[in-house]
Image (cartoon, rainbow, N blue to C red):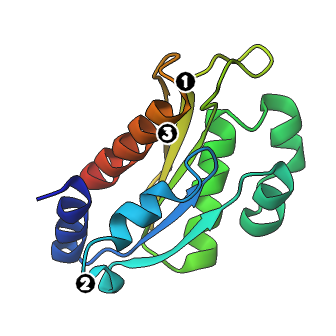
Amino acid sequence: MSLAFDVLATCRAKGLTVATAESCTGGMVAVALTDVAGSSDVFICGFVTYSNAAKIDMLGVSDATLDAHGAVSEQVAGQMAEGTLARSKATLAISITGIAGPGPSGHKPEGRVCFGLAKAGHSTHVETVEFGALGRAQVRTAARDHALEILLRG
């Protein structure tokens, strides 16, 4: 069995539906979930919001938050997750924003990824993981897997 299978089975058992908002992973979490046959009863939709404009327009992330903290921040990850929850009508939303590389972005290092988890009726959870300079593909894969683990606990 796969981590995505476990996420779907757990959400199904709890009566939860899932939506995703992804930046640096470009939809990898949504792909992992929809690769599992029968995922349509749990997975609602995925937003790939790579640019700041997309984060603002599609998810309602605040210009002020982006200006103050940058796209790769727990504040933006939280707003992405909350916007996804509101716009998808899912009961559980995961968001990912990070620096996959190669190299750092400004003063933020390669491998820094921020996650948000919004659940209907609960406070939004945010966290940052420093995966390190693993290389673009490995950072993206590690971020995908970590997001699935967060959903599994969600």
Label 3 vs 1, first from the N-terminus = 1
Rendered view: 96 above or below 102: below
Q: Mark 2 highlights which residue?
A: 38
Q: Mark 1 highlights which residue?
A: 111
Q: Amino acid at mark 3?
A: Arg
Label 2 vs 1, first from the N-terminus = 2
Relative placement, left or right, of 118 versus 10 is right
Asked if the residues shown at circle 3 and circle 2 are in contact, with their CB atoms under 8 angstroms apart, the answer is no
- Mark 1, Cα crowd under 10 Å, few <14 / some 14-19 / many 20+, is many
Which residue is painted at 80% across and 18% down in the image?
A: 106
Q: Amino acid at mark 2?
A: Gly
Q: Give the Cα distance between marks 3 and 2.
A: 25 Å
The quarter of the picture where the C terminus appears is bottom left
Dividing the picture into quadrants, the one containing residue 9 is bottom left
Q: Nearer the viewer, residue 122 or 107?
A: 107
Label 3 vs 2, first from the N-terminus = 2
Dividing the picture into quadrants, the one containing residue 1 is bottom left
The location of residue 82, given as percent across then percent down, is 60, 59
The location of residue 56, given as percent across then percent down, is 82, 58
